[in-house]
Image: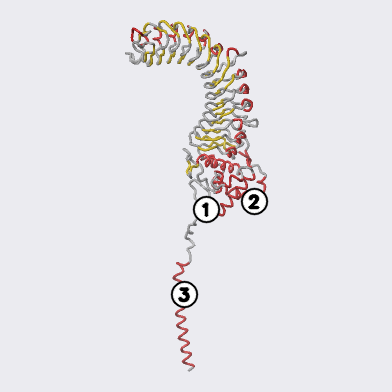
Amino acid sequence: DSDVDDDGKGRSCLKMSVATFFVMVLLFMLVPFVLPDRNASPPPQQTPSSNDNPNSPTTTGDSSPEDPILWAEIMGSLRSFFLRHDIASKESFLDGTSPQSKALNWLSNTPLASSYNSNYQHDSHTSSQNWEQDKLLRPLVEQYSLAVLYYTTGDSYGDNVWTNQDGWLTAPPSEEEDNTHYHCEFYWGITCAPLYENDKQWNKMEVVVGLNLTYNNLQSSLPTELALLRNLESLELPYNSLEGPLPQELAFLDQLQYLDMGFNLLTGQLDDTLGETNMWSNLFMLGLNDNQFSGSIPSTLGTSLPLLEQLYLENNQFTSSVPESLGQLSDIVDIRMHKNQLSGELPNVLAAMTNLEILFMHENQLTGIFAALPIRLFETHKLTEMRFSDNRFSGSLPLYFFELPNLEYLHLSYNMFSGQLPPILGDAISLKELTLRENKLNGSIPSSIGNLVNLELLDLGENELTDVLPIEMGELINLESLYLENNRLQDLIPYKMGNLKNLQTLQLHWNAFSGHVPDEICDLTSNANGGGSLQIVTVDCAGGDAAALITCDCCSDCF
């Protein structure tokens, strides 16, 4: 019995050994399929979409952060830094859809922010450090400022409406590369320069000095964060659709030299921005024209901007008088305040502006008698253009206007000037345009007018001028337009006016001329054999030859 049992046990062991062998062979064959290949690439990680995470950064051309936990850490670190240095307010980050939140979200996903997080997150000295002097913090703040501008003035239902946004908020270089000045190199409209040109320690630190987004469809209001571009020298944003007032914070851009905000929809009063605390002492060009500014022109304008050379405030709704402080602008070359509601008299101190070349004050409500002033209002010999039309000036014409040797454009129409045209008129030999329409001028036209050989436009219409046309009118060989209608001129039209080969418009109606329009003038018309340039000729020839005061064979209109 024992032999039988031993034999059975042996067969059982043999069966188990064979089974074990086959199991091991099977496992060996399955190993390549179960264990991962060490040489194979790891499977791609799944990152949450912006729809899954409402706090994910808004980027342009970038994917969501590869490490959401790290990104949240960076964003929290940046937020603390911005709040600690008053770069942003806590309220601006409460709304996740605000331009500030979008800018923070975008910035948190850049290599520059990662560099900040690696270098400064646990460094307590940043709480007191001046970020403006730091090679990493300075560009970090500048990129935040530009991102806020981008989202504030261009974001519309998730799409940006800027006409040109080349380079803006695109993916910067990797963290291993120098990405601190990426915005300087690739953002369209940005100009940068070294912070300290002669300091070797800082010669690689560039800062934004120019921002030009002209004709770029910017909308909404300007963000206050624009003032974070501390070294901005030139800010050009004309021909856009910007609204609201100028941020008061812009007044603290003490390096600003050129500011052009013309042709927008800006509102408010300049006193709010250009107060006595203004720091634009380096500004030489201020362009706020063609907006909707109202109220007074700041009385301290001339003292606040001592280096100003160009001042453009035209086509707004200013209602004050012209500030006397303008007289302190010794370097001013060009002043344009036309198309406002300015009133009062021009201050005598304007005589101190000895470098003035252009002065536009037309279409206001200015008053005064130039000839009665105790001093000559404009002593400068550099004046080339003066436009005072459509105001309420009165008295006789100032004689010294015609003594300005370089004066080319003198517009005095639609005022209440009276008296006669002075013979000294002929001394203004540089004049190209002289307009005196609709005043109360009387007497004859002086023969000295023939000296104005450079004249292209002469408008004396709707006055009370009398007597005959001087034959010297034929000396104005460059004249293109002559308006003499609605006066009391009489007698024959000088045939020598046929010398005016460049004449295009000749309006002589509503006078008392007699006789016939000279053939020499008709030969200047486009219908003549020579095909001249004269297109418009008007005289009092209506009613046929019998009833007309004057006959005309070439008139475009008879009155």
Quadrant (top left/top right/bottom left/bottom right) for the C terminus: top left
Q: Earlier in the sequence, mark 2 or mark 3?
A: 3
Element type where label 3 sits in the image: helix
Q: CA distance from mark 1 to mark 2?
A: 27 Å
Dividing the picture into quadrants, the one containing residue 508 is top left
Q: Nearer the viewer, residue 5 or 303?
A: 303
Q: Nearer the viewer, residue 63 or 36?
A: 63
Q: Earlier in the sequence, mark 3 or mark 1?
A: 3
Element type where label 2 sits in the image: loop
Residue 16 on image: x %, y %? 46, 81
- Which label belongs to residue 122? 2
Looking at the picture, the colour scheme in use is secondary structure
- Which label belongs to residue 24? 3
Q: Residues within 10 Å of mark 1 (few under 14, many from 20)?
A: few
Between label 1 and label 2, give the one nearer the viewer: 1
Which three-letter amino acid code belongs to the residue tagged 1?
Asn
Q: Earlier in the sequence, mark 1 or mark 2?
A: 1
Which three-letter amino acid code belongs to the residue tagged 2?
His
Element type where label 1 sits in the image: loop
**Residue holding disc 1:** 53
Which three-letter amino acid code belongs to the residue tagged 3?
Met
Q: Nearer the viewer, residue 508 or 525?
A: 508
Q: Nearer the viewer, residue 535 or 214?
A: 535
Residue, x 57% and y 52% (percent of image)?
72
Between label 2 and label 3, give the one nearer the viewer: 2
Between label 3 and label 1, give the one nearer the viewer: 1
Q: CA distance from mark 3 to mark 1?
A: 49 Å
Q: Indicate whether 158 appears above or below 514.
A: below
Q: CA distance from mark 2 to mark 3?
A: 55 Å
Dividing the picture into quadrants, the one containing residue 310 is top right
